[in-house]
Image: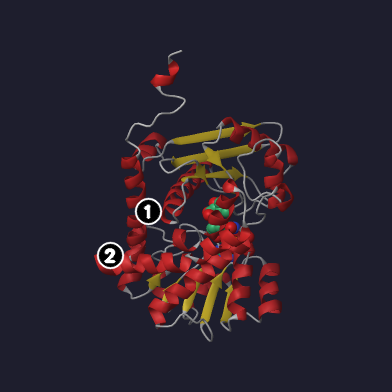
């Protein structure tokens, strides 16, 4: 990958490589766009096969956060971090403290939170070095683990997609295939089970799968077989790029609605879903519950207010489908339109001069 070419093509602002020999930290902070405000996005820890793969993931995820935050009506830009390493083996206190100091060095341009492979405990360590972190333990006035709130948002968005596909938003009796039953999907399955849905789950982690069987009476399938199960709704809740040339023709569902980021391998796969008559709830619209929740910390966390906003993901998904229908485009494009129009509107409105501490009028003594 030629990094500057890639950054220019998709209009990235900044890419920060963070290295700390003592702790073994190797982190990449990608800031995509801060038109709407500071970049907020989680930190993923993962065993990347190469540095290039890690950089690409950070860049793709950061751009997704720009669109997620914009489409959700947040005054925040998009950024994301990836830490190269095995979250089960390679973590230590020093690593997250060192990472916190790198974030502090960005002086508020980037604010972090949890993502795959990181926990509230990791955020607490970062918090010892910087205030630019959310999803910290509630004892610090923070909102804690965002995953259950992300799950609530996905549940609300899934109901909206069901309304479009089946003419009613009840999930009772619907068969839902869930790929990955980790932090978010565990809470999602709880909502779905309580509403009377039938669950078919898969995971590469046996313990996580067993928990879904024991608590929600879920059936299980091998991870390779999840695309082939007969179901009403497919919920990708593991990693990205799962809607691709190998999987798309195996799906028999009417709805794709799940928590994973970057579900479409390429945007043309979103067009193919639409052509097949499958209602796709765009990933960054449906999974915005976590970021909406942690963003509320920035104005003094109020759980009821945050949950009310997350409930609104239902309406946001309906809005996306309405734009898709109005403009004759696929739902992923409709979501992009929603996000891009908001960013452009704000960019234009900010072109007006505003008196501030930093402009020329104030530099004169
Ligand atoms: N945690 C949050 O609040 C948010 C998470 N997301 C996204 O949702 C997805 C899930 O996040 P979490 O639940 O936090 O992560 P997690 O790591 O707790 O759960 C992911 C699960 O997927 C499983 N998995 C991995 N590869 C798999 C495969 N090939 N087949 C089947 N299962 C597989 C893992 O074993 C794990 O149980 C990620 O894409 C994440 O970026 C998006 C927004 C917020
Ligand atoms: C809790 C969020 C900030 C996690 C995130 O990075 C995301 O929504 O993908």
Depth check: give the residue in front, 343 or 281: 343
Q: What's the mark number on residue 39?
A: none
Task: Examine the rendering and report whether any part of residue 220 can be seen.
Answer: no
Figure quadrant of residue 85: top right
The nearer-to-camera label among 2 and 1 is: 1
143 or 8: nearer the viewer: 143
In this rendering, is residue 332 above or below 14?
below
Q: Residues within 10 Å of mark 1 (few under 14, many from 20)?
A: many
Which residue was labeled with disc 2? 329
Secondary element type, mark 2: loop
Residue 140 coordinates in the image, percent (x, y): 71, 47
Q: Residue at x 57, y 52 (%)?
A: 296
Q: Which of the 4 image quadrants contains residue 290?
A: bottom right
Residue 144 visible (yes or no): yes
Q: CA distance from mark 2 to mark 1?
A: 15 Å
Quadrant where the N terminus lies? top left
Give the residue displayed 52% in from the left and 78% down from the top. 176
Q: Nearer the viewer, residue 66 or 345?
A: 345
Mark 1: which secondary structure?
helix
Pointer 1 residue:
339
Q: Nearer the viewer, residue 81 or 268?
A: 81
Q: Is residue 271 above or below residue 293?
A: below
User: Could you say where residue 342 lies in the image, as x and y percent from the top left?
Assistant: 36, 50
Q: Quadrant of ligand 1?
A: bottom right
């Amino acid at each position: 990958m030629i990094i500057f070419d890639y950054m220019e093509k998709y209009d990235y602002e900044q890419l920060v490589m963070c290295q700390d020999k003592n702790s073994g930290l190797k982190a990449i902070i990608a800031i995509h766009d801060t038109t709407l405000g500071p970049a907020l996005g989680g930190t993923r820890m993962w065993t990347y096969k190469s540095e290039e793969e890690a950089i690409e993931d950070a860049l793709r995820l950061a751009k997704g956060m720009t669109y997620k935050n914009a489409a959700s009506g947040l005054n925040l830009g998009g950024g994301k971090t990836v830490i190269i390493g095995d979250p089960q083996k390679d973590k230590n206190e020093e690593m997250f403290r060192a990472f916190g100091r790198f974030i502090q060095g960005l002086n508020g341009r980037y604010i972090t939170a949890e993502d795959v492979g990181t926990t509230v405990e990791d955020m607490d360590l970062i918090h010892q070095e910087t205030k630019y972190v959310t999803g910290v333990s509630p004892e610090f006035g923070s909102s804690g683990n965002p995953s259950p709130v992300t799950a609530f948002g996905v549940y609300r968005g899934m109901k909206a997609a069901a309304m479009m596909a089946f003419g009613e938003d009840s999930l009772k009796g619907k068969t839902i295939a869930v790929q990955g039953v980790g932090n978010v999907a565990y809470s999602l399955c709880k909502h779905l089970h309580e509403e009377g849905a039938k669950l078919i789950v898969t995971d590469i982690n046996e313990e996580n799968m067993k928990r879904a069987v024991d608590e929600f009476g879920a059936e299980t399938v091998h991870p390779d077989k999840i695309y082939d199960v007969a179901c009403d709704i497919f919920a990708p809740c593991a990693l990205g790029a799962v809607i691709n040339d190998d999987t798309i023709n195996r799906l028999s569902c009417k709805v794709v609605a799940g928590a994973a980021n970057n579900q479409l391998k390429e945007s043309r796969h979103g067009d193919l879903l639409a052509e097949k008559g499958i209602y796709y709830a765009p990933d960054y619209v449906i999974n915005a519950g976590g970021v909406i929740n942690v963003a509320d910390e920035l104005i003094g966390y109020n759980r009821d207010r945050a949950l009310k906003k997350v409930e609104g993901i239902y309406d946001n998904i309906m809005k996306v489908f309405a734009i898709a229908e109005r403009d004759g485009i696929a739902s992923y494009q409709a979501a992009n339109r929603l996000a891009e129009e908001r960013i452009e509107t704000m960019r234009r409105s900010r072109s007006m001069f505003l008196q501030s501490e930093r402009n020329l009028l104030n530099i004169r003594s």
